[in-house]
Image (cartoon, rainbow, N blue to C red):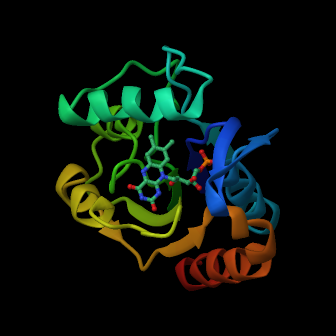
Amino acid sequence: MKVLTVFLSMKGETIAPGMKTVNLEKGYTNTAAEYIQQVCGGDLFEIVPVRTYNPDHMKMIYEAKEEFDQNARPAIQSFPDSIEEYDVIYLCFPNWWATMPMPVFTFLDHFDWNGRVIAPLVTSGGSGFANALKDLEETCKGAVILKGIEITGHETEASMKKIQDWAWRIRQEKN
Ligand SMILES: Cc1cc2nc3c(=O)[nH]c(=O)nc-3n(C[C@H](O)[C@H](O)[C@H](O)COP(=O)(O)O)c2cc1C
C-alpha cells in the first residue's frame, strides 16, 4: 500500500474572519496535508510555483485571478518522477477563485490519471470545493475520485481529527 499526499499552500498573509489579516508560518493546506501523512505515512509532495506571488495578500489574490482568467498553467518547480506506484493520492489544495489554484492544474496535466485513485481535500474561506470537483474530474480523465473533505482554512487545526479520520478510513478501504 503506497500513499502520496500532494499539496499546494501559501504561507504568509491570509485573511481571517472579520477581514483581519494574519501571518501564517505555515499555510492551512500544508498543515492539513501533514495531518494526513502523520496517520497514513507515505510520501509528501509540495507543488511549488516557480513564480513568486505578491506578499501583499490582496495583490496576490488578483495575480491568481489573472492566471485563472487566462486558464494559465504556471510553471512549477518539480514533479514526482511517477505517480503509478501509489494506491491512493491525497490531493490537497486551497480554493482559489472557486476552483483549484492554476499551478495545481499544471501538476495534474503532467500525468496520465487513468486508473489512479484521488482523495481530494480543500481548504477555503467557506465555499468548499465549489467548481473544483467538476474541474478535477475533467482534468484527470479515467481517475477514480473518492469523496473529498472540505475544511474552512482557519479551522484546520481544530479539524485535525476529522481530517485524519477521513484519510485513515480511505486508506483502510483501499488496503
Ligand atoms: C487567490 C485566492 C483566491 C481565493 N478564492 C476563494 C474562493 O473563491 N472561495 C473561498 O471560500 N475562499 C477563497 N480563498 C481563501 C482560501 O481558499 C483559504 O484562505 C485557504 O484556506 C488558504 O489555504 P492556504 O493557507 O493553504 O494557502 C482564496 C484565497 C486566495 C489566496
Foreground of the two, 144 or 148: 148
Residue 66 picture location, percent across and down: 28, 28
Give the answer, above or below, for where 132 lies relative to 106. below
Q: Residue at x 19, y 55 (%)?
A: 141
Foreground of the two, 93 or 84: 93
Q: Residue at x 65, y 63 (%)?
A: 17
Q: Residue furthest top?
A: 51
Residue 79 picture location, percent across and down: 49, 27
- Image-quadrant location for residue 169: bottom right
Q: Quadrant of the C terminus?
A: bottom right
- Image-quadrant location for residue 18: bottom right
Asked if residue 86 shows in the view, the reply is no
Q: Residue at x 42, y 69 (%)?
A: 127
Give the answer, above or below, for where 107 lies relative to 42. above
Viewed as shown, does residue 96 lie left or right of 31?
left
Residue 16 picture location, percent across and down: 67, 56
Asked if residue 68 shows in the view, the reply is yes
Foreground of the two, 32 or 42: 32
Total of numbered circles in the picture?
0
Residue 59 picture location, percent across and down: 48, 27
Q: Residue at x 45, y 36 (%)?
A: 61
Q: Quadrant of the N terminus?
A: bottom right
Viewed as shown, does residue 158 lie left or right of 12?
right
